[in-house]
Amino acid sequence: MSKQPLPEQNNALSQQRFLMGRLLLITALCAPLLGLAQLKFFILVITLGLTLYYLTALKTKFITRRTYRVALLVFAFLSFSLLKHLYFGELSARYFLYLSYFILTLFIFLFSIEVYKLLARDVLVAIFFYSAAATLLLACIEYALGFSLLAMLPLTGEGHQVGGGIWSNVNTNIVTVLFASMSIFLLGSKTKFYVLTAIALPIAFVLDAKIAILCILLQYMFIALVQSRWARIGVLAFIFIITPVLYAIFFEQVNVIGKTLVQATDLIAQPELVRSLAESGEIFSSAIRVYALLVMFDMMALFGPLDWLFGAGWGSINITFKNVNWSEPVEYFSPHFFYVEVLVYAGISYYLFYYFLIKSYVKRLPWSKFVFAAPVFMSIVAISSAVYYPPLYLFLGLLIYQREQQEKVHSGSPINHD
């Protein structure tokens, strides 16, 4: 028989797990910073941290029936997907790279549910708040300098750096702050939420993070509309009184946002124009994003039943174009539309997999919170790709954790335990 850990050993392991949980949560929120400024190199950092965390957790937790259900679900999803992609010759080095992103973010999601049970609410709020504050501070410093301190490049120079900061992109920086601030709101610290987003909004205007601005404003309105009658009056006041004042102050930025939306709408109706713009090098932000979307639609137009079910294979989207400002043609440009991207990669089975995975934790999905946080989920279309973006899975884990705790309270079961 194997020896059971002594109480002192259990306490030491629990303290170790507690510390590693905090460090790993910070790592996931500031991942590229801790990955030596390389946007994808942070995967190695997080993978190592997750491995150490789960090795420690195995020593302090019993394996439950849920563990077996989750393991069986993951095995079934990966097995059927791999068989389909192997049979149709869709495997490649890029395939396994993107498959590793899926596995990593899956473990981040599972880890997040555990760490929300492990850490006190005040600790979680502090981690989200100060991580977001660090993101904003670094973005502002680099913007003032016109130079990326992490990548050691001019913000508009070699490497196509477009905003610096922890996440190397203006939209991604602000979207990360939005995820953090909404997590703070859901954890019950409304004051910190309002402080953080009130700071983030003008910074987003200065940094020209157009889509992120729209999502922040929408989330503000969603929150205000569910608060009280006076809050709803405040929303109306914001729309009819404050909005013209803000428009006067940020006239130039607002016009840029409006023109971008008009350009995107016009281009959707002219797919051949989009393609010619991309191929000629005379391309702008709206055209690039719409062109990426059209490439994915073209791929899906050729889908058969198995493709709709299991996708065309991880990393299979190759969006290529030229740009006169860049020295060489771009290949495998990021799709910029996560929900369509994973549909192409893994098909409907990706969404079914996460549905049944979530159902292993809760009886009913938190649809009301999904709708309430819709602007947050919408905001990820502003970033290049969410297949390796930890904050999305941390936020989803928070929603599921809170729903699980609500169901345990209603059933009279002990909370914070499996």
Image (cartoon, rainbow, N blue to C red):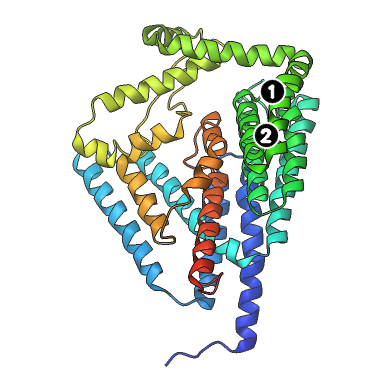
Which residue is at the front of the view, 408 or 303? 408
Which residue is at the front of the view, 63 or 225? 225
Q: Which residue is mark 2?
A: 232
Residue type highlighted by circle 1: Ile
Q: Could you say where residue 166 lies in the image, as x and y percent from the top left?
A: 67, 39
Separation of disc 2 and disc 1 at Cα? 11 Å
Residue type highlighted by circle 2: Arg
Left or right, residue 199 beside residue 216: right
Q: Could you say where residue 105 lies in the image, as x and y percent from the top left?
A: 48, 50
Quadrant of the rendered structure where residue 215 is?
top right
Q: Could you say where residue 56 lies in the image, as x and y percent from the top left?
A: 55, 71
Of mark 2 and mark 1, the one earlier in the sequence is 2
- The relative height of residue 185 versus residue 17 in the rendered view (above or below) is above
Quadrant of the rendered structure where residue 240 is?
top right
Q: Could you say where residue 277 lies in the image, as x and y percent from the top left?
A: 45, 8
- The relative height of residue 79 versus residue 345 in the rendered view (above or below) is below
Label 1 secondary element: helix
Which residue is at the front of the view, 184 or 349? 184
Which residue is at the front of the view, 105 or 328? 105
Left or right, residue 167 beside residue 280: right
Q: Which residue is mark 1?
A: 239
Asked whether residue 166 is in view, the answer is no
